[in-house]
C-alpha cells in the first residue's frame, strides 16, 4: 500500500521539523488520527485492531481517563511543593497493589526517569556504584539508562556496568532443562559481583525486567529470578524490577510481573501503561529504603511529576483496571490467544516457537525448525501484510524474525480471534 | 497561620505515601485546590496572587490549553512511531521562534530529559566527553544532569565535569565594572578547556543558563556570553543553552533569553513553561548537528514524548503567547514592577539589591548595605507573611535571603501593584 500524497507530504514535513533521528514503524508508515478501545483509524478511515500498544493500557481514549484528565485540568495543575490531594490519593491506591514492604511511590514522568532515579536511590543507599544488567536489555534513554541498555547502546559499557547473559528458552543450550538453565544463568552473576568488586565499584543494584523483552520475550523461570536476587542481595546490592513494560497486570497473574517468580524486589520502576498515554511513571520502594536514601542526603523533586492532572489520570487508570477486572481478562484472553497461536504453529511450519506470558507474546518465525534459521524477511512481510489487512503487531530481534503481540489490557477473545485469523492468512500468503 | 486539621491529616498521609524525600514550600504548606490566570485558591477558599510559578506560563488552567488537551485526548494519544500531524505542526510553530539555524525540535517530557539528551547529542557529535558548567547551577535530576547541578549535588564532580564561577553582579569584586567582569569570568573557561583536555575528555559542551538562577538570579552581561561561547567553540565544544526557566518570553526581550546576548547556541533545552503544566519539553538544534548525530549512530525515541495530546497542548500555549503578545506584556509589566521594586529599595534599607530581567526578578535582603550581611531570617519571615496575606513568592540563595519573583507571563500591572503593596507591608511588618 503506497502512501497517499497527503501522507507523503506530512512525512517530508516531519523529517524537516523533527529531524532524521525519528524513525517510524512499517515500511509505509501508518498515519493514525483516531483511537477507541482496541481500535485505531487512519486518515482514510481504515480501521486497525491494535495488538501492539501497551501504553493505551485500558484502551485508547478511555472515557473515564479522558474525563479525569479534563476535570482536573480545569481546576489546577501545579507541582508537589504545594500540598494537594491527588498525588497522595494516587500513591495510596498504588500501594494497595504493591508487593512486600513496598509502599512509597515517587512520581516521575517517564520510564527512563523511573529507572534513572531507582539507580540513584540504590547507589546512595548501598554506597556502591556498580550496576548489573542482562544483555540485550532496554531500560530507557537518559545517559545512565542508555549505558544500561545494550539493546540501543553502540559503545562499550562503562566499567561500572556488568552484563550477564539473559536466558533464552528457545535457542540456548539449556533450553530443554529449566533447572540446569536456572543454575547456569544464576551462576553468571557470581562473576559480575566479583568483577564489580575488583573494579572498586561494588554492587549497587541488579536492574532487571520481569519478562525479557528485547532478547526475544522470555518469561524468566522463577528459580532463576530467586537465585539471582539472593546472590545480588548477599553482595549488598538492591534489586530494581523494571516493570515499565511488564507491570500493571500485563503478565496476567499479578499486578506486577516480578511477583510471578515469588520474589519481592527493593524498588519497582513503572511507566508505559500507568497514564493510559499521559506521561506518568513511578519509582516505588520501601519506607526503610526511602528513609535511608534521605538520611544519606538524598532528595527528590520533579517539576512536572506528581501534578494533580497526572495523578488524577493515574487514579482513573487504576480504577478501570480494578473495576473491570483486567487482570482476569488478561489471564483468560491470553490463554485463548496462546491456544490459537499454538494451533497455528501446528499448521504453519514457519512458526518455530510461541512463547511469553499474558499479553506479552512472541511468535518466532524460522525457515527450518531444526536449524532454527531466522525467517526475518518473512516476518517483515507478514507484519506489513497484517497491517495492510487491519491488524497492528510489530517485530523484534536481531534478525527481526520475532512477531510481538502486546495488546491493550481490554483486548477480548473476539479480538484475539480476528488477530489469529489475520495471522493465519498472512502466513498462508507468504 | 496554623494548618487546619484536614491539611495536617493530608500532610501525614503524604509523608506516608510519597515518603520523606518530598519537601514543600513554606513552613506551613499551602494546600491549593484551584487556579485561574494569576490566581490560586486554597482549600479554605483563600485567594493567592501567584508571583512565582513559571510552569503555568499562560496562566493557570488557560481555557484554550485545557480545551486543546481535552479535544485531542478524546481523539488519539499515541507515540511517534506512527505518523501524526500534531507533533509536526508543533515543531514547525516552534521553529518560527528559534534563533539562527536552529529549526529541529525533538520532543521530550521534562527539562531534565531535554538537558540530558542535549548532552548526549553534544558528546556524540563532538566525540568529546567533557562538560563545562557554571557553579551553583541547577539543570535537572537525571544521573548525568545531577552531576551537572552543583546546586543539588553533594558529592564531588566527576572528572569530566568542570565548574567555572558564575558572575555575580552584586557581590563579586568586578561587580562595578562590566568589562573587567566579562574578561575575568570568560578567562576562567580557558582553564576549564585545558583541564578537560589534559584529562583526556576534551570539551563536548558548555551547558549554560540564559539567566543565572540558582546563584541568585543574575542576567549575564552579553560580552561575557559572547566570549564564553567563542572560546568553547574554538575548543571544539557545542553550546547548550538551558532555556528551561528563561525561555518562552520570560526575559521580555526575546522568545529565548540567550538571544538577549546576541549569540546563538547550538542546542536549546526547553521545559517548564512549554505545556502550561503538562509534561512537555524540547531539545532543539540545527539540521546539520542533528544529521551529524544520526550519521554517527545517534537515534532517538521517547515513548510518551511527542504524543498528539502533548503536542496540541504545546501548540495552544504557543498560540496564546503569540496572540496575546505576552512578550510585550512581560517587557512592559516588568518595567513597571522594577520601578516599583526600586522605589521600595529607597524606602526599605533591608533591600540590598533589586535585579533580574523580565519576569525573573530578585530582591536581595541584607542587614547592612555596606557589609551586605544576608538577611536570611527576615527573608523567610517576609515570604511567609506575604503568603499569609495572599501573595506567593519564594526565596533562594545559600542564605535564603533572596526573594524570587517569577510570575506567569499573563501577570499585569494591577497584579504588580498588589505584589508591590504586599511586599511593602511585609517589609514594614518585619
Image: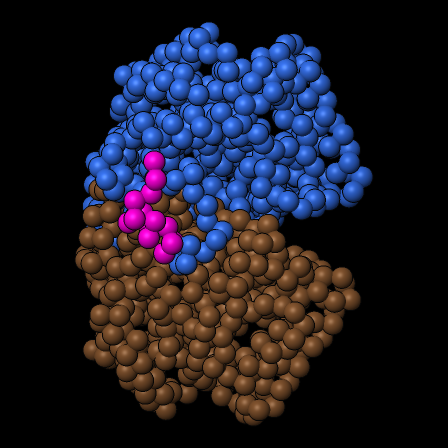
Chain colours: A brown, B blue
The front one of B317 and A328 is A328
Which residue is at 40% across, 16% downward? B428
Asked whether residue A15 is in view, the answer is no
Q: Position of residue A37 (x, y in %)?
A: 22, 64
Which residue is at 26% across, 70% downward? A322
Which residue is at 37% across, 50% downward? B11
Q: Position of residue B365 (x, y in %)?
A: 52, 20
Determine whether B288 is above or below B301 in the image: above
In the rendered picture of this protein, how many numbered marks are placed on residues? 0
Q: Which residues are magenta?
A: B1-14
Which residue is at 54% across, 62% downward? A289
Determine the main secondary structure of the stretch shown in magenta: helix
Determine whether A174 is above or below A229 in the image: below
Along the horizontal axis of the image, is A309 left or right of B185? left
- Residue A336, picture quadrant: bottom left
**The magenta stretch spans residue B11:** yes
The front one of A201 and A382 is A201
Asked whether residue A259 is in view, the answer is yes
Along the horizontal axis of the image, is A365 left or right of B267? left
Determine whether B280 is above or below B60 in the image: below
The front one of A4 and A305 is A305
Determine whether A195 is above or below A188 in the image: above
Q: Position of residue B96 (x, y in %)?
A: 38, 28
- Residue B275, picture quadrant: top left
Residue occupying the far right of the picture: B198
Quadrant containing the C terminus of chain A is bottom left
**The magenta stretch spans residue B340:** no
Quadrant containing the N terminus of chain A is bottom left
Q: Position of residue B171 (x, y in %)?
A: 63, 18
Amino acid at each position: 500500500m503506497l502512501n497517499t500524497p497527503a501522507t507523503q507530504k506530512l512525512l517530508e514535513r516531519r523529517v524537516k521539523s523533527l529531524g532524521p533521528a525519528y524513525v517510524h514503524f512499517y515500511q509505509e508508515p501508518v498515519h493514525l488520527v483516531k483511537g477507541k478501545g482496541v481500535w485505531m483509524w487512519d486518515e482514510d478511515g481504515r480501521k486497525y485492531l491494535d495488538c501492539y500498544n501497551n501504553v493505551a493500557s485500558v484502551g485508547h481514549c478511555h472515557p473515564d481517563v479522558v474525563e479525569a484528565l479534563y476535570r482536573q485540568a480545569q481546576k489546577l495543575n501545579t507541582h508537589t511543593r504545594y500540598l494537594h490531594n491527588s498525588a497522595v490519593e494516587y500513591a495510596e491506591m498504588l500501594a494497595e497493589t504493591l508487593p512486600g514492604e513496598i509502599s512509597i511511590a515517587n512520581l516521575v514522568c517517564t520510564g527512563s526517569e523511573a529507572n534513572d532515579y531507582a539507580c540513584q536511590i540504590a547507589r546512595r543507599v548501598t554506597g556502591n556504584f556498580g550496576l548489573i544488567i542482562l544483555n540485550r536489555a532496554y531500560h530507557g534513554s537518559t545517559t545512565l539508562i542508555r549505558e544500561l541498555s545494550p539493546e540501543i547502546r553502540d559503545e562499550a559499557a562503562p566499567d561500572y556496568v556488568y552484563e550477564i547473559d539473559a536466558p533464552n528458552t528457545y535457542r540456548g543450550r539449556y533450553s530443554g532443562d529449566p533447572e540446569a538453565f536456572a543454575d547456569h544463568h544464576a551462576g553468571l552473576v557470581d562473576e559480575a559481583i566479583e568483577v564489580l568488586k575488583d573494579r572498586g565499584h561494588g554492587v549497587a543494584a541488579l536492574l532487571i525486567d520481569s519478562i525479557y523483552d528485547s532478547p526475544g520475550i522470555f518469561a524468566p523461570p522463577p528459580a532463576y529470578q530467586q537465585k539471582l536476587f539472593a546472590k545480588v542481595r548477599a553482595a549488598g546490592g538492591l534489586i530494581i524490577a523494571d516493570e515499565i513494560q511488564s507491570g500493571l497486570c500485563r503478565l496476567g497473574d499479578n499486578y506486577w510481573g516480578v511477583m510471578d517468580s515469588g520474589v519481592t524486589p527493593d524498588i519497582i520502576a513503572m511507566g508505559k501503561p500507568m497514564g493510559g498515554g499521559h506521561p506518568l511513571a513511578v519509582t516505588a520502594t520501601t519506607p526503610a529504603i526511602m528513609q535511608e536514601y534521605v538520611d544519606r542526603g538524598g532528595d527528590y523533586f520533579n517539576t512536572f511529576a506528581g501534578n494533580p492532572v497526572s495523578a488524577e489520570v493515574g487514579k482513573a487508570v487504576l480504577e478501570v483496571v480494578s473495576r473491570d477486572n483486567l487482570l482476569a481478562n488478561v489471564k483468560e484472553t491470553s490463554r485463548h490467544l496462546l491456544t490459537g497461536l499454538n494451533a497455528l504453529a501446528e499448521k504453519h511450519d514457519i512458526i518455530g516457537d510461541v512463547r511469553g506470558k499474558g499479553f506479552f507474546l512472541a511468535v518466532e518465525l524460522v525457515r527450518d525448525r531444526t536449524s532454527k534459521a531466522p525467517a526475518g524477511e518473512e516476518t517483515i512481510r507478514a507484519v506489513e501484510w497484517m497491517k495492510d489487512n487491519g491488524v497492528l503487531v510489530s517485530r523484534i530481534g536481531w534478525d527481526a524474525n520475532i512477531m510481538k503481540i502486546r495488546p491493550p489490557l481490554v483486548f477480548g477473545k473476539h479480538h484475539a480471534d480476528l488477530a489469529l485469523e489475520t495471522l493465519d492468512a498472512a502466513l498462508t500468503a507468504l
